[in-house]
Image (cartoon, rainbow, N blue to C red):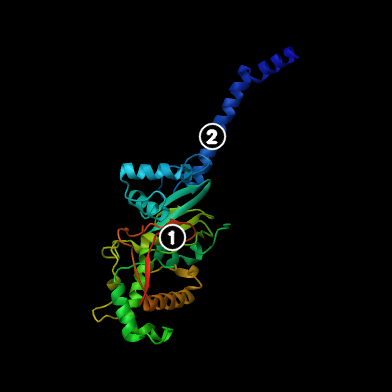
Amino acid sequence: MDASLSLLWQYVFSPANIVGLTAFVLVFCVLQQYAWHQTYGNIPPGPKPWPIVGNFGVFLVPSFILRRLAKNRKMISNPLSPQAGLMEMSKLYGNIFSIFVGPQLMVVLTGYDTVRDAMVNHPEVFSDRPHIPLVTIITKRKEKVQQEIDAVVGSERVPSLTDKGNLPYTEATIMEVQRMTVVVPLSIPHMASETTEFRGYTIPKGTVIIPNLWSVHRDPTVWENPDDFNPGRFLDEQGKLLRKDCFIPFGIGRRVCMGEQLAKMELFLMFTSLMQAFTFRLPEGKSAPSMHGRFGLTLAPCPFTVCVKAR
């Protein structure tokens, strides 16, 4: 038995077999690299992916370690907030960059101009879908909202959709909340239905396209002081509501959210009814909740406490 194992060992690990196996591995790696460059040779730039897990290896790191790294390095973006992290990456790689989730190529579109160009001017390519398994309370300027509601609606009846045109500041406040806390910050992923050229880069068929709506609504080229809460940006000099093309919380192009109009009506009725009946404020000594939120399919607010008082 021992002799048989010894002979097998000598055969498997003989110099000829080792040389042959090494040559096979080298040829395989060269062919893999050639095939990769043939497919992804002109894709948008991006960070080098990790083996197997791609660029999402950071999510294998425990969250408490990421928080400590963020604190020690004084990082601008929250490592647990992907939409902000992707926006930071765009400063390094540009408004069109690539990431990999495992072997799957994803192209992230950042900024209003880039997202609009892809979703509106190239809908025949970027409107496919890959196969994939309320509004945060803000206490700023609530008094002005309540004054407008009191003047138009009063306290004897509940708000209705017919009041919408007479409550421009209230609607501007809702829009500003949506701008600062995009409910679906990375939109629903799109997919390239065919290989195409976009802004000088090759986008292979089957590439997942991620429109970063968070970056669109924090784009300093189209929003003045984008990190400031200012409903006045949606009002003209006469106090009338302004419709801005760069305000796209429900997406843009062929794949715009089908429930947009229903959601707008629900948001308006819910927000005005709450502001008509209650006053909201932070408890004494409590800081304002984080605007990063908790990332998932939607951006949910972080846990926080609030005092609610009937008016």
Instruction: Tell me which amino acid carries mark 1.
Output: Pro
Give the class, few, some or many, for how many residues have Cα within 10 Å of label 2's Cα (few <14, many ≥20): few
Residue 148 shows in this picture: yes
**Left or right of 154, for residue 252:** right
Relative height, residue 24 to residue 179 (above, below): above
- In the picture, the disc for residue 231 is none
Q: Residue at x 46, y 42 (%)?
A: 62
Instruction: Tell me which amino acid carries mark 2.
Output: Cys
**Left or right of 22, for residue 166:** left
Residue 191: image x %, image y %? 52, 59
Q: Mark 1 points at which residue?
A: 211
Residue 75: image x %, image y %? 32, 47
Residue 209: image x %, image y %? 47, 57
> If you read the primary sequence from the N terminus, does the residue marked by circle 2 or circle 1 appear first?
2
Quadrant occupied by the C terminus: bottom left
- In the picture, the disc for residue 29 is 2
